[in-house]
Image (cartoon, rainbow, N blue to C red):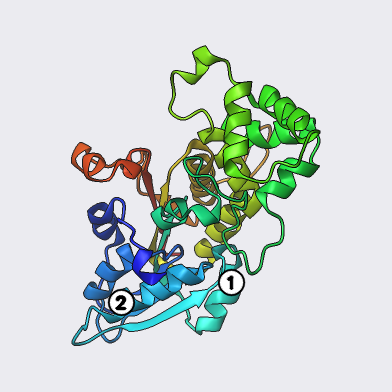
Amino acid sequence: MTNQYRHIPVLLAECLEQSHLTSQHTFVDATLGGAGHSSEVAKMLGPDGILIGIDQDDMALAAAGARLESLNLNTPPRIELLRGNFGDMDELLLQAEIPGVDVFLFDLGMSSPQIDLPQRGFSFKEDAPLDMRMSPGKQTITAAELINTLDAAELTRIIRENSDERWASRIAQFIVEARECKPIERTGELVDIIKAAIPASARRAGGHPAKRTFQALRIEVNGELDVLRRGLDAAVRWLNPGGRILVISYHSLEDRIVKETFAEHARTCTCPPDLPICVCNAHPVLKVVTRKPILPTSEEVERNPRARSAKLRVAQKLKQ
């Protein structure tokens, strides 16, 4: 399993530059994956530094541990790999017994191995059981259960809100009609239903016709948007003054949450707009470093097509 876990880190040079790391810093990789980013961070930290990696995927933790161990650093930092979801950041960092964090990195979305392993059920390119759980050992609801139990209105809401799919209502109706004959249990079955629901003229543009629906179901199964909000808010609380949060997102829903969260913590006033003067005495907690997101270069996209939609946003905690 570990040998299969290969992941090319996205925007690596940009992340290292924006981290402003020193050898004594505490760095939290909230989405450890195969430790693509963290293996480079480990080289920059010294014996007084701390590297904490968080992932809910056992395969990722095993691969990351092996990769970090193989570095054979002369003066390695303290390294702790924690199994969990970054939405539970408070509990995880209390477990690590650290006073604060200098840099957080969130690399959102799917890792390459999760997509590439058919049995995980994330890919619309391979026929497999409709699963899509990030942490199968802890989660019970699968994509198949959603598809086969929710009514057309709720399926429409999930597909539309989580992916901006234009044909959400029609796809939901086709799903409900198809499951009347037999339960929809495999990714290939769902792909065929989606293709039938989307008119041929619309299928010829915009990539694979099932991409948006699969994204929407994955987000719903794993509660990704709520988890992201909780994780970002916790990171702001744990960040040391002058420390930074780096977030790589891959679709507009994630990017919007990151942008809005940073803006909320950077606000200087929370009073209602109709008040003539400020009475809240609120102070901003963050400074937004990247007014516009940092994008991958054309050379990186050519090397790693999955970087194409990546956007990096950075915020820094103010010194009160």
Residue in the image at 51% along x and 67% along y: 57
* SS label for mark 2: helix
Image spot of residue 94 (x, y percent): 56, 80
Q: Is residue 280 visible?
A: no
Q: Is residue 111 visible?
A: yes
Quadrant of the rendered image containing residue 186: top right
* SS label for mark 1: helix
Q: Please state if 12 lies on the left or on the right of 145 as rendered.
A: left
Please tell me the numbered disc located at residue 311: none
Q: Please state if 130 lies on the left or on the right of 262 as rendered.
A: right
Image spot of residue 3 (x, y percent): 34, 69
Residue in the image at 32% along x and 68% along y: 38
Instruction: Bin the neighbour count of mark 2 within 10 Å (Cα to Cα): few under 14, some 14-19, many 20 and up.
Output: many
Quadrant of the rendered image containing residue 7: bottom left
Residue nearer the viewer, 90 or 301: 301
Tell me if residue 291 comes above or below residue 238 in the rendering: above
Instruction: State which tag comes first along the sequence, 1 or 2.
Output: 2
Q: Please state if 103 lies on the left or on the right of 274 as rendered.
A: left
Image spot of residue 308 (x, y percent): 33, 38
What residue did someone put label 2 on? 68
Labels 1, 2: front one: 2
Residue nearer the viewer, 68 or 141: 141
Instruction: Bin the neighbour count of mark 1 within 10 Å (Cα to Cα): few under 14, some 14-19, many 20 and up.
Output: some
Tell me if residue 24 comes above or below residue 121 in the rendering: below
User: Marks 1 and 2, Cα distance to the nearest angstrom?
Assistant: 24 Å
Residue in the image at 28% along x and 50% along y: 11
Q: Amino acid at mark 1?
A: Asp
Query: Given contact means CB atoms under 8 Å apart, are the residues at marks 1 and 2 in contact?
Result: no
Please tell me the numbered disc located at residue 90: 1
